């Protein structure tokens, strides 16, 4: 069987530690092309570049893998990788990450890492976003390697249900080995934000968002529970946002239609 | 009963025609505060500003309504409106739009308009995104007024199911009057993109995304059908992305856990 063709991207930027590791891991099972943002894009959600041009430059290889840096968002990177960089070839797998920082629970909405994976799924390619629950630039990813490969290999083998991408999160490295993988739902949480009001050196005010969150979701079937208990969380994510249960409520109980 | 407190925002920027109309309409049923981006933010998806400061300035009122312009994304505007601008007061309704351009189907993911509404729903406030299927700066919104108000009033009266925001799209103005409102699911479509390769005046290459889409979804219960048939489409949207149907597939048929 031919080696699978794999696109690697991320939202921390093409030079981050996480994408270098992911590229090496993927190169052990496939033929890899990296197309990633030329600068960090955390928190970009599913942003795309409509009103501006994009720059795309080939840069130094990582091992055998070709590497392109793009001025756009993670979703742009997937689009330009699929429709331009790969030419007529079709990717078998798109992987995004490994993100420096967690993308569990509601963070999936704000996550550039996951927007790339979801973009891949929209375009019909099996796609995975990987994130480590540690922000540090030099974070230790070594406990994730076997799981990154195992999950990628299963996705290449089984494909994924139509319209589904995987959101994979790893706990921060601990003394105890990871206990295994849990297939989860997205936990119900929200960020509690406040805005620090500060003055710049010219005396003009600016605001900086500060945030933290508490997990009120008491379930043991969600991604936050898995991470807190030293499991890898795998949430299958879809991009049909329809709240189907609400359609009948709006039709039957409201006076709209 | 006290007038409802309404936050108005958008993604086309605070000076667009659509937000001025929405503000006027909302001022007829509530007390309105506008907090909107200081520049156009189309295609921003659910981006938020984490690594940079935000600027927020009060500007000229629209009628009686206070207006703030913010340097952030639509989701940032909702966050700073709720946690800073309104102080201890709670909004009864958040409305976003009226967008110049459609946010039907998969566009809901890329839409700054809808990210503001979904952010509102995450924070527990009934929220609506309104979009007109016409891009023009001077688009004619006059056929939408009654529907904008009717839907807002129903939302204030009934609230919305927990975790649900409404995605409302209006057909472009036609000779025939709008036929009514359809409660819909999100149509299954995708954009077909290609990238125009061009050279700038210095001879350096850049790319510009060009796109179009075809609707292959044959259903008559989705938003594209409603718009094509001159109805207002109302899609209830959720932010739990879990593909619940895929959890059992991954648990039972895959060798992961």
Image (cartoon, coloured by chain):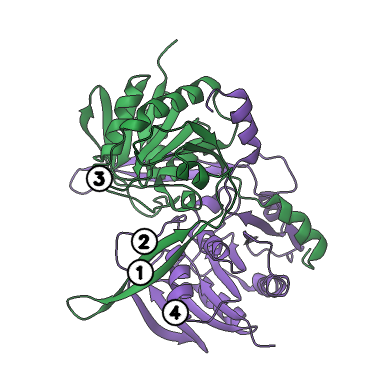
Chain colours: A green, B purple
> Are labels 3 and 4 assigned to the same chain?
no
Residue that appears at 79% across and 63% down: A257
What secondary structure is marked by label 4? Answer: helix
Q: Quadrant of residue B54?
A: bottom left
Which residue carries the number 4 mark?
B85
Circle on res. B71: 1
Work out how far the residue at label 4 is from the one at label 2, CA to CA, in angstroms. 17 Å
Residue A146 at x, y = what percent? Answer: 39, 25
Give me the residue at 57% from left, 70% from top. Answer: B95
Going by the picture, which residue comes out furthest to the front? A176
Q: Is residue B136 left or right of residue B56?
A: right
The circle drawn on residue B49 is 2
> For residue A133, what is the image quadrant?
top left
Query: Mark 1 near mark 2, Cβ–Cβ under 8 Å?
Result: yes
Q: Which class describes the residues within 10 Å of circle 4: few (<14), some (14-19), or many (20+)?
A: some
The chain under label 2 reads: B
Q: Nearer the viewer, mark 3 or mark 4?
A: 3
Instruction: Identify the chain of the residue marked 4, using the numbered disc in the image.
Output: B
Q: Are marks 3 and 4 in contact (CB under 8 Å)?
A: no
Badge 3 and badge 2 in a common chain: no
Q: Nearer the viewer, mark 1 or mark 2?
A: 2
Q: Nearer the viewer, residue A152 or B139?
A: A152
Contact between labelled residues 2 and 3, with CB atoms less than 8 Å apart: no
In the picture shown, does residue B147 fall above or below B188? below
Q: Nearer the viewer, mark 3 or mark 2?
A: 3
């Amino acid at each position: 069987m031919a080696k699978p063709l794999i696109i690697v991207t991320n939202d921390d930027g093409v030079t981050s530690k996480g994408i270098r590791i992911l590229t090496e891991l993927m190169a052990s099972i496939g033929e890899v092309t990296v197309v990633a943002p030329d600068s960090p894009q955390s928190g970009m959600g599913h942003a795309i570049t409509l009103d501006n041009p994009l720059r795309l430059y080939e840069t130094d290889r990582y091992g055998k893998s070709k590497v392109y840096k793009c001025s756009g968002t993670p979703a742009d990177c997937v689009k330009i990788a699929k429709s331009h960089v790969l030419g007529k070839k079709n990717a078998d797998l798109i992987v995004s990450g490994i993100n420096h920082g967690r993308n569990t629970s509601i963070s999936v909405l704000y996550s550039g890492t996951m927007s790339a994976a979801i973009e891949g799924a929209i375009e019909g390619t099996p796609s995975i976003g990987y994130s480590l629950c540690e922000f540090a630039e030099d974070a230790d990813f070594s406990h994730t390697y076997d799981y990154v490969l195992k999950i990628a290999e299963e996705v290449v083998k089984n494909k994924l249900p139509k319209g589904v991408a995987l959101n994979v999160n790893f706990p921060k490295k601990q003394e105890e080995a990871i206990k295994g993988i849990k297939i989860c739902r997205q936990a119900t949480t929200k960020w509690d934000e406040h805005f620090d009001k500060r003055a710049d050196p010219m005396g003009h005010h600016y605001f900086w968002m500060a945030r933290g969150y508490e997990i009120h979701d008491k379930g043991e079937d969600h991604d936050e529970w898995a991470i807190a208990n030293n499991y890898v969380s795998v949430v299958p994510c879809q991009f049909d946002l329809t709240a189907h249960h609400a359609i009948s409520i709006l039709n039957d109980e409201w006076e709209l239609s």
